[in-house]
Amino acid sequence: MEKWQVLLLCEQPLLGESLEHILSNLEDVELVGCWTLDDTVLPRLSGQDLDLLIFAEADSPGEQVTQLTAQLLDACPNLSIVRVALARRDLRIYSSQSVPARSTDLIDLIHHLRS
């Protein structure tokens, strides 16, 4: 079984430790690390081969996370990004992957987004 290479970025250490414990116990996930969210994240990511990046946010999304998400999608188009917001109790999934498509694929996508 091939493991997903996952990196966790967290604003608060306690939240990061909790998610790190959960992710470390999954058989199909290899947690590459749990990093603090700071200005060195983007340069440090250049050498990583990741499948998924998880932002763990305790409060509403800050401008730094929003800007970094956009930069990452531009720099790493095949990287999936999930933002976990503890205060809102929701997950937001970001991806810029390009896939071959036909007009019927777009119509199907529109219909599935409603459900």
Image: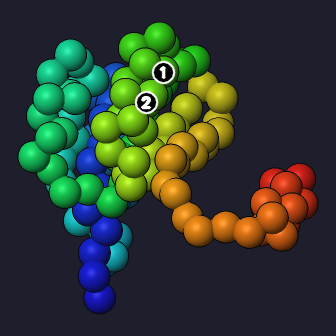
Task: Give the quarter of the figure containing the C terminus.
Answer: bottom right
Q: Is residue 32 visible?
A: yes
Counting from the top left corner in percent of width and height, residue 40 is at 15, 22
Where residue 103 sits in the image (x, y, percent)? 81, 64
Q: Which mark is residue 95?
A: none
Labels 1 & 2 near each other (Cβ < 8 A):
yes
**Residue tagged by mark 1?**
66
Along the line of sight, the residue nearer the viewer: 97 or 37: 97
In this picture, residue 76 sits left or right of residue 83: left
Q: Residue at x 60, y 25 (%)?
A: 87
Question: Residue at (66%, 29%) from the top-left corner?
Answer: 88
Q: Is residue 27 left or right of residue 66?
A: left
Residue type at mark 2?
Thr
Name of the residue lying farthest toward the front: 102
Label 2, residues with CA under 10 Å away: few <14, some 14-19, many ≥20: many
The quadrant where residue 105 appears: bottom right
* Left-right relation of 105 to 55: right
Residue 63, above or below 20: above
